[in-house]
Structures are given as structure tokens and as C-alpha cells.
Image: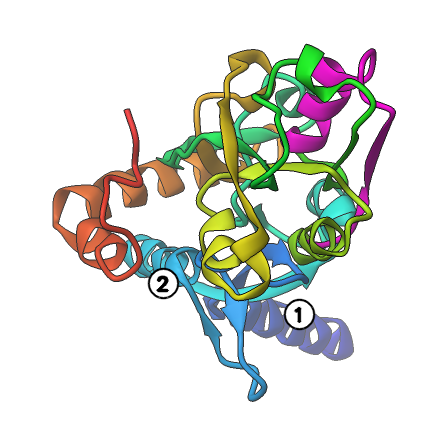
Amino acid sequence: MRTAIKLLAVAALSAGFATGAAAELKLGLDTAPYPPFADQDASGNRSGFEIELGEAVCAAMGETCVWTPIAWDGIIPALTEGKIDAIFASMSITEERMKTIDFSDKYYNTPAALVAPKDMDIDGSPESMKGKIVGAQVSTIHANYAEAHYKDTADEIKVTYQAFDEHNNDLVAGRLDAVVGDSLAFVDFLASDAGQCCEIKAYLKDEAIFGKGVGVGLRKGDDALKQKFNDAIAKVRADGTYDAIAKKYFDFDIYGD
């Protein structure tokens, strides 16, 4: 009997420690750099708009968060399997993704763009892409757009690129004629020496594919955590924290309409 009581006491004590310990929220982000949203230096220090905003949102929630890198094409499975608690990685809120996961309110919105060499005569229409080779990052809304709008006219659509920089490199090397991606993510590339070859040819629209903005990806049914993120996003928007962070990276309203 004493042994049983002792075991119960130990179990209760252990449960108390477990309950009292502050659990860390694992925020999933892409393993590949995605400036100006997320980057990492040689020492492992993270920087970027989304990194600063994510940490501010976690502080507003009163949570301890840890960044957890996941390859982009595996980031939704990592969430649904419980390997991470949320996706904070420029993931657009789309109807297709909402079949599998849920989202917080949006925290920014930028248009997609088609980028190609300056001397190439294309305007983003399917007809202008006839015979062209078009690239986009794997498992993205930009890949979905390329396949939906250009598959009948383009010579080839390559959507196997694991990182944003990979298709830019192939564009510079002449292995691609055009790439589809987030317009803001192209800024650093187009300002670089390598990117002087190219320009934005068109801003692309398709709300069914691109959605209405970027939000925090969450497991379906995780309503309490969703509410915490929504409240925290609203808080940093209202108290000026959001604008203070955004002004470090952008000279326009990144939140969007």
C-alpha cells in the first residue's frame, strides 16, 4: 500500500512539473532562405521581416517559440503530423490548402509576378508564353498558377525547384525563359548583378489560386491556438509593432488591402 501511495505521489508530482513547464511552440519555416522575409547568416542568426514579426507575435501571445526549419514540400505534412505547431513561412491562404489545414487571419499580402529577361517579348498572358520554359518553386501557389495558366501553351513547366534562388539561377543561365514567384521576393534578385538581365513582365492575378494573403498555418481543430494568433496579430497591428518592423524592410504597406 505504501509503495502504491508513493508511486501515486511521484506520478502526481511529475504531472505537476509537466503542467507547470512552459511548452515551446514550434514555428515551421522553409529550410531555404527567402529574403527579405527570412534569412540566416553563417553563425545561424535568423533575420528578416517574418522572423521579427513571428517573434513579436509570440511575445504578444506570451509564448516561447522556436524556429523549426522544414523543407517546403514537407512543411504541411510536418504540421499535420505534429512535428511543428504552426507554419510561419509566407504561406498563402488558399481554398486548396484549407482542405488540409487551417489559417490565422492574414499578416501580409503581396502580388505574384512573372520575371523574364528584359529583351523577351512576353506579357504574362498564356498566348505570350507559347514555346517558353517556365519555372516555379515546388509545392507553391506560383507553381499552381504556372501549371493552370501556361500548361497548354508553354513548351515546358518546371516546378521541381526546392528553393526560390534555384529557379532564379536557371533563369540567369538561360535554362528557363521565365519564372513565377512573389513580386517582393524578386526584389533582391533583380537588384543584384546577376538579376540585371531580367525584369518583372507582369503582375499576376487569380484569387482562387493565390488566395487573399499570407497567414499562419495551423492544424484543423486547433481553434484555441488560432484565436491566440489572431489576437496577437491584431495586437501588434494596433500597438505599432507591426509598422515598426515593416518599415525596416519595405517602403510601402506590406499588409495590403
Q: Secondary structure at mark 2?
A: helix
Residue 52 marker: 2
Residue 174 included in the magenta stretch of the image: no
Amino acid marked by disc 1:
Ala
Residue drawn at (44%, 22%) of the image: 212
Q: Name the residue tied to disc 1.
A: 11
- Identify the residue at the far front of this view: 119
Amino acid marked by disc 2:
Glu
Q: Mark 1 or 2, which is nearer the eye?
A: 2
Does residue 212 lie above or below 185 as drawn? above
Residue drawn at (58%, 86%) of the image: 42
Residue 112's x, y, as percent?
Answer: 51, 31
Residue 208's x, y, as percent?
Answer: 57, 12
Q: Quadrant of residue 31?
A: bottom right
Residue drawn at (28%, 24%) of the image: 257
Q: Quadrant of the N terminus?
A: bottom right
Which residue range is magenta in the image?
141-163
Q: Secondary structure at mark 1?
A: helix
Left or right of 243 in this view: 111: right
